Amino acid sequence: MTDSQTPGPAPNPLAASLVILNRETVCKHLTMERCIPLMRQAAIDLSKGVMRLPLRSVVPLAGAGKFGIMPGALAEDGPFGAKLVAVYPQNFEYGLPSHQGVVALFDPESGAPICIAHAGEITRVRTAAASAVATDALARKDATHLALLGYGEQAAAHLDAVACVRKLEVVTVWGRSPERAKAFAQDAAARKGLRVEACATAAEAVAEADIVCTVTNARDPILKAAWAPRGVHVNAVGASTPDAAEIDNALVARGRLIVDHRESALRQGGEIQRAMAAGLVDDGCVVGELGEVLSGAIVGRTNRDEITVYKSLGNVSQDLTSVAWLYAAAIAQGFGSRVGF
Ligand code: NDP
């Protein structure tokens, strides 16, 4: 055998079986409290270039549906994989999650798939956990008032997540349907033991807020700079494709803009692209990535009165980090289903 034929390290024997983690299992083990530090580390690793992350591909489907393909690797020699996710905004009307799919994790030694996890549940938790990390880094320390624009799955998850990093006293919520906003407020108040009020307009909901999360399917802005109070921190989460914008051009221009991934935000972020097309900003509007704030490479909030904006498009480093942790826990603790593969 020549040197070039020398076999590499022995393949991981665990790679012979595939671990399946369904929605209930992901929900039980990937708690918000567990996911927040994972997303913190994922953001730092992403900004340091440890992770490999090509831009996502999106296939438009009939109606408003989209199919997203998000590949990546946690490190040059680390686990790799992809999220395959169908996004069906229309599902909200039927009480179904809008995100459906799988996250597949592969073994770096053998190249074999080792874990498949419920992408909808991973997305629900990791998105809000990443916003909690951003909120902790960028919102004022004494923030107590959260405003939610939207009352779907991400709104509930963001309430849970933000409550992990700030001592909330008041929550205001707005959405297109006053009845749904009221129902969300009642549920959330009972679930969290907080004062939660439904508001008639988005402007009213954010007027006295310290933290605002935009978590809707809106294609055009639902939050305007003119309504944003001094010193507010905004997590702009709902618009994750180039054809949607939840915050207006003026807010992109006025806020101190921190993004989850610079290249994705500049090339695929609808809000930033609209503000650039309007001639209000250029590439320089992105101050930096969340991971750079966390590592101390750049400053987050520079003063109490500044408006900070975290633009989240979501990325597969968050999904793969979550599933790699779940997989290790599943092997150690014996949960999940195993199939020969
Ligand atoms: P849901 O389907 O659970 O909720 C959607 C919400 O958007 C509802 O409150 C709905 O209420 C509202 N909505 C729909 N159309 C409009 C509109 N034109 N104006 C204002 N509100 C509207 O979705 P999720 O909570 O799971 O996700 C929310 C958004 O976040 C989606 O756009 C999703 O793609 C995005 N997302 C982003 C991620 C990221 O990483 N950045 C990850 C996961 C989700 P109603 O129809 O009654 O108005």
Image (cartoon, rainbow, N blue to C red):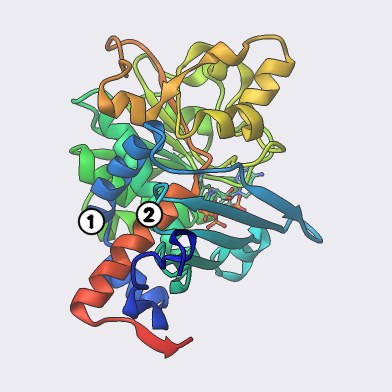
Towards the viewer: 11 or 243: 11
Determine whether, in the image, residue 135 is placed left or right of residue 260.
left
Q: Answer above or below: position of 223 versus 60.
A: above
Q: Mark 1 points at which residue?
A: 34
**Residue positioned 19% across, 25% down in the render:** 141
From mark 2 to mark 1, how far is it between C-alphas?
21 Å
Q: Can residue 168 be seen in this view?
A: no
Three-letter amino acid code at the position of disc 2: Gly
- Residue 189 in view (yes/no): yes
Percent across and percent down for residue 110 are 43, 70
Amino acid tagged 1: Arg
**Disc 2 residue crowd, few under 14, some 14–19, many 20+, Cα 10 Å:** some
> At 42% from the left edge and 43% from the top edge, which residue is drawn?
51
Q: Where is residue 45 in the image (x, y as percent from the top left)?
A: 34, 39
Asked if the residue under mark 1 is in contact with the one under mark 2, i.e. CB atoms within 8 Å, the reply is no
Residue at the disc numbered 2: 78
Q: Which of 43 and 27 is in front in this view?
A: 43
Query: In this rendering, would 264 be left or right of 32?
Result: right
